[in-house]
Image (cartoon, rainbow, N blue to C red):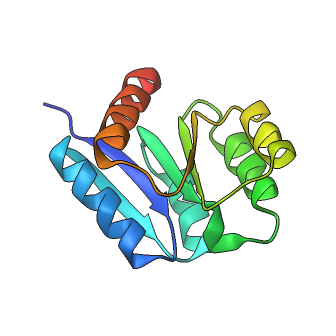
Amino acid sequence: MHQSNGLIFSRDVDTIAVFSQICRTIRVNLEHSQDIKTFLLKVMQNSLGFIIFDCDSLKSDAPGWVTLIRHMRPKIPLVVLCDDVDREVGGRMLEEGVFYLALRPFQRNTFAQILQAALKQAK
């Protein structure tokens, strides 16, 4: 059976730990990066079922990073994590084709379902 892969960018070790646990429960291999350059290389080089981007790790120009990721891999579902986001910025991210825009705090069970749905869309 094929193992699905996901990728997360976050500088928050707790966020990485939570999503690593979620991915273990749904049997998905999750790579992570705390460095944006390494993350972008992994986005381009890896076969991915979904991408998770913690925009609070790069507060400056989060929508710009989302746009770049969408242009790099437009068919891969992108989940964006935020502490808070105003209507205009959130709307711009959704217009870019973000699969799911999540505000903290988030529920583990909900995210297991979201990531499984993302994997189905990526196929």
Q: Position of residue 79 (x, y in %)?
A: 54, 44
Q: Residue at x 50, y 47 (%)?
A: 51
Choose top left, top right, bottom left or bottom right for residue 56: bottom right
Residue occupying the far left of the picture: 1
Q: Residue at x 31, y 62 (%)?
A: 18
Q: Residue at x 50, y 53 (%)?
A: 45
Q: Quadrant of the N terminus?
A: top left
Choose top left, top right, bottom left or bottom right for residue 20: bottom left
> What is the count of numbered marks?
0
Q: Nearer the viewer, residue 33 or 57?
A: 57
Q: Position of residue 52 (x, y in %)?
A: 50, 52
Is 120 situated above or below 9? Answer: above
Q: Nearer the viewer, residue 94 or 42?
A: 94
Q: In screen coordinates, is 48 left or right of 80?
A: left
Is 74 situated above or below 32? Answer: above
Q: Quadrant of the C terminus?
A: top left
Q: Residue at x 41, y 67 (%)?
A: 15
Q: In screen coordinates, is 23 left or right of 8?
A: left
Q: Position of residue 121 (x, y in %)?
A: 45, 22
Q: Position of residue 6 (x, y in %)?
A: 38, 48
Q: In screen coordinates, is 8 left or right of 108?
A: right
Q: In screen coordinates, is 97 left or right of 86?
A: left
Residue occupying the far right of the picture: 88
